Amino acid sequence: MANKLDLIPITEWGIFTEFHPMVIAGPCSAESEAQVLETAAQLAAAGVHVFRAGIWKPRTHPGCFEGVGAPGLPWLQEVQKQYGMKVCTEAASALHVRACLDHGVDMIWIGARTTANPFLVQEIAGALRGTDLPVLVKNPISSDLDLWIGALERLQRAGVRKIGVIHRGFSSLRPVPYRNDPGWRIAIELRTRYPDLPFFADPSHMAGSRKYVPELSQRALDLGLDGLMIESHCRPDCALSDAEQQLTPAELKVLLTERLTVREADTEERVYRENIEQLRARIDILDENLLEILKSRMAVSEEIGQFKKEHNIAILQTRRWDALLDDMIRKGDAEGLNEQFLRSLFGAIHEESIRVQNEILAAEE
């Protein structure tokens, strides 16, 4: 798959006035015209130029607040008219897209549940064909990078060129302090493949609690992501959905102006350039050493595979692997290495080892 998308730069979308970082903020749900306008007024006063609000809300259980629907779209028009803000909302069907186009919504996003359904993404792409509406695509619920990329490709095939992504974390069975597992490695991989793709983080849905929003926002900026989509409500404790993760506009202003450090993409400052090049040269040497070590390890795996074949022994030795992994994690912890990193690293090495041994057992005598 070619790592190329035909994109119109986000500086030409006519949506954002500031680009480092770009900020989208507003309530999880549009609940009433008064709530929408009051929140928008406070956010505009806080310096936010792009307003978000969910009109249709996909919820896990029926009977929960599922949004006001199309009657809320005129409220977004009022936000445009009264405060000069650009507005965006989530669209999960062709019907939603057409309603947004009819009401002059400036931008839409595709939610995580929708991104996970290629049929719905294709339907939305078809409805966008021939339009100029910008689209941000949230990652799917599961950590499936190809599914995320597939959604981008479907939009591209429909002629959509104003495309960006929103990283909101992934559902996970392993315990994490947040609502969703940040899964930064997936974001980094997508960023690496498509460096020109506008990239936002959604720390609100990642966090699930407003207390974690600052640290996750900072992590996103530290990684060089382009912007933040943060939920903000004039009275969060009264919100009809996701009350725990929303900030007041005043809290959001403090976060953006006082608590976050925006990193520069690069600098030509002499001392930095000299030192960073030396450090990178050391990394290059270490990486070359790693390749040699991995080559040697796989050579031993081949010998093990041949030995097992000669003695008619099964490839997978679960007890041996579990003991080895536990030992590596224990030793790694003593060296200050992250457990999840070690699990991922040795898991990949073990998987390749099994593949190599499988090939040997499958080879003809």
Image: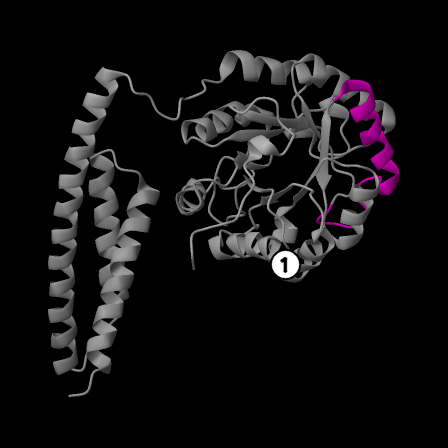
Residue located at (19% from left, 37% from top): 283
Residue 181 painted magenta: no
As drawn, 17 above or below 240: above
- In the image, what residue occupies the spot 30% across and 55% down? 347
Residue 120 lies, in percent from the top left, at 68, 58
> Quick one: 287 or 97, which is closer to the camera?
97
In the displayed image of the protein, which residue is found farthest to the bottom? 365
Say if residue 170 shows up in the picture: yes
Q: Quadrant of residue 158?
A: bottom right
Residue 178 vs residue 37, the one in the foreground: 37
Q: Is residue 262 left or right of residue 321?
A: right
Classify residue 335 as left or right of residue 72. left
Q: Which corner quadrant holds the N terminus?
A: bottom left
**Vertical side of 79 occupied by 200: above or below:** below
**Residue type of the residue flagged with mark 1:** Asn
Write the residue at 20% across / 33% down.
280
Q: Is residue 244 above or below residue 182?
A: above
Q: Crowding at label 1, few (<14), some or many (≥20) Cα neighbours within 10 Å?
A: few
Instruction: Tell which of 123 and 246 is nearer to you.
Output: 123
Residue indicated by mark 1: 117
Q: Position of residue 62 (x, y in %)?
A: 79, 50
Does the magenta segment cover residue 68? yes
Q: Quadrant of residue 117?
A: bottom right
Q: Residue at x 60, y 55 (%)?
A: 116
192, 35: nearer the viewer:
192
Q: Which residues are magenta?
A: 58-84
